[in-house]
């Protein structure tokens, strides 16, 4: 009985405290601890889009160092979205960086890994167009085996 009473008193105190805080904030008197609370809204444009534009600018100037830096930032931003379109774009830029760097094997491998990852995400997204686009990229690079594997993902949908 005593535990139940204390439980009710404690619950009531918490409810009254929450009501008081929100009541004060509705009148414009925000308690100092809550004045710095920030509400985050979803982005209308994913962060990787802006980073890809910076990669493209650096590639246009043939600034390999800056292109690589921005590419790494775009890579991280695309991974955070968990969507295939960002990874495909980052993979495409890896191919362009490899070309600018004289056929860098590192960026060629990174592009392949990005395309594979994007293919699995596109399968989860039920996006056969994205999967077939990835297969075409593998064919352009002369990797018929991976192109076939990616096409099988599309065929299983």
Image (cartoon, grey):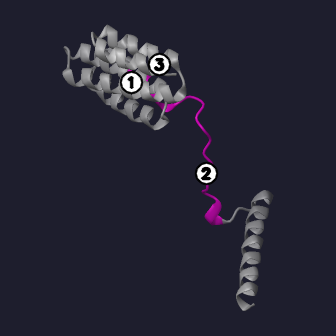
Numbered circle sitting on residue 150: none
Please determine whether, in this image, residue 4 is positioned above or below residue 47.
Answer: below
Tally the numbered discs: 3
Q: Look at the image and say whether residue 48 sits in the magenta stretch.
A: yes
Q: Alpha-carbon neighbours of circle 1 within 10 Å: few (<14), some, or many (≥20)?
A: many
Mark 1 vs mark 2: which is more N-terminal?
Answer: 2
- Residue at image x 44%, y 22%? 153
Q: Is residue 151 left or right of residue 110?
A: right
Please determine whether, in this image, residue 130 is positioned above or below residue 139.
Answer: below
Element under disc 2? loop
Residue in front for this viewpoint, 30 or 125: 125
Mark 1 vs mark 3: which is more N-terminal?
Answer: 1
* Residue 84 shows in this picture: yes
Residue 45, image x and y in percent? 56, 28
Element under disc 3? helix
Q: What segment carries the magenta color? A: 32-55
Residue 122, image x and y in percent? 48, 25
Provide the residue designation for mark 3.
154
Numbered circle sitting on residue 38: 2
Residue projecting furthest to the front: 156
Q: Quadrant of residue 33?
A: bottom right
Residue 4, image x and y in percent? 74, 85
Residue 118, image x and y in percent? 42, 26
- Residue at image x 60%, y 31%? 44
Element under disc 1? helix
Tell us which disc is closer to us: 3 or 2: 3
Q: Is disc 1 in contact with disc 2, using a CB cutoff of under 8 Å?
A: no
CA gap, disc 3 and disc 2: 42 Å
Numbered circle sitting on residue 90: 1
Q: Is disc 3 in contact with disc 2, using a CB cutoff of under 8 Å?
A: no
Quadrant (top left/top right/bottom left/bottom right) for the N terminus = bottom right
């Amino acid at each position: 009985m005593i535990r139940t009473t204390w439980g009710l008193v404690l619950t009531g105190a918490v409810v009254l405290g929450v009501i008081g805080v929100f009541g004060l904030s509705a009148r414009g008197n925000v308690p100092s601890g809550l004045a710095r609370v920030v509400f985050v809204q979803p982005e209308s444009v994913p962060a990787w889009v802006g980073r890809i534009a910076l990669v493209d600018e650096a590639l246009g100037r043939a600034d390999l160092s800056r292109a690589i830096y921005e590419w790494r930032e775009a890579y991280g931003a695309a991974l955070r979205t968990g969507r295939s379109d960002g990874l495909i774009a980052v993979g495409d830029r890896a191919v362009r960086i490899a070309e600018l760097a004289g056929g860098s094997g590192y960026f060629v491998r990174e592009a392949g890994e990005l395309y594979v990852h994007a293919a699995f995400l596109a399968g989860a997204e039920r996006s056969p167009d994205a999967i077939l686009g990835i297969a075409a990229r593998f064919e352009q690079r002369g990797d018929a085996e991976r192109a076939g594997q990616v096409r099988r993902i599309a065929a299983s949908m």
